[in-house]
Image (cartoon, rainbow, N blue to C red):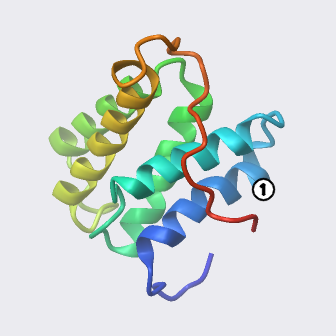
Amino acid sequence: MPAHHPADVERRALELLVAVQEAVVKADALTRPMLQDVAGLLQLEEVFGGLAWPDAQRAAILVLLSVVNHVDPAAAMRERAHLVLTEGGEDVWQDRTAVVRSISAAASVLDCERAKCHPSRSATDPPRRVATLGDA
């Protein structure tokens, strides 16, 4: 990760979401396309827009871990947003309010994609590809 703040924080956070999965998580072959789909949906909703780079990095990792490790990633993200809001983290987050907005928006995007906007789909179905950030 670069030490400087990238010009396009939102795009870099979305790319990070996919790149970290490849470098660290080593999940199955279906995970990369799913995370690209999630990144595309988050990009459409500008979920990381307005965050400082350190907050965007941490929020992207939080989304990644929620998607990869939880049966209900939206609920996991909402729980984390609640913790950020109620338990502080001033030493970690530059703008807690913006982070809570971002994490909550990401949870809403996943809820919409997996259930509300596609009622015929199961909550365990991976989201459909909306946009691809390009292979890094």
Instruction: Provide residue 66's location: percent of width, then percent of height.
Output: 51, 34
Q: Secondary structure at mark 1?
A: helix
> Residue at the location (37% across, 34% down)?
77
Q: Who's the residue at 82% across and 33% down the image?
A: 28
Quick check: 14 left or right of 53? right
Q: Disc 1 marks which amino acid? A: Ala
Residue at left offset 77%, top offset 34%: 30
How many labels, in total? 1
Q: Is residue 3 left or right of residue 91?
A: right
Q: Position of residue 110 (x, y in %)?
A: 42, 33
State the image quarter where residue 32 is shown: top right
Quarter of the figure with the C terminus: bottom right
Residue 88 in the image: x percent, y percent? 20, 49
Q: Quadrant of the N terminus?
A: bottom right
Question: What residue is disc 1 on?
Answer: 23
Is 39 located above or below residue 133 in the figure? above
Q: Position of residue 46 (x, y in %)?
A: 34, 59
Question: Does 40 sit left or right of 20 as displayed?
Answer: left
The answer to which of 21 and 33 lies nearer the viewer is 33
In the image, what residue occupies the spot 22% across and 64% down?
95
Query: 10 Å neighbourhood of mark 1: few (<14), some, or many (≥20)?
Result: few
Image vertical order of residue 72 relative to residue 68, above or below: above
22 relative to 54, above or below: above
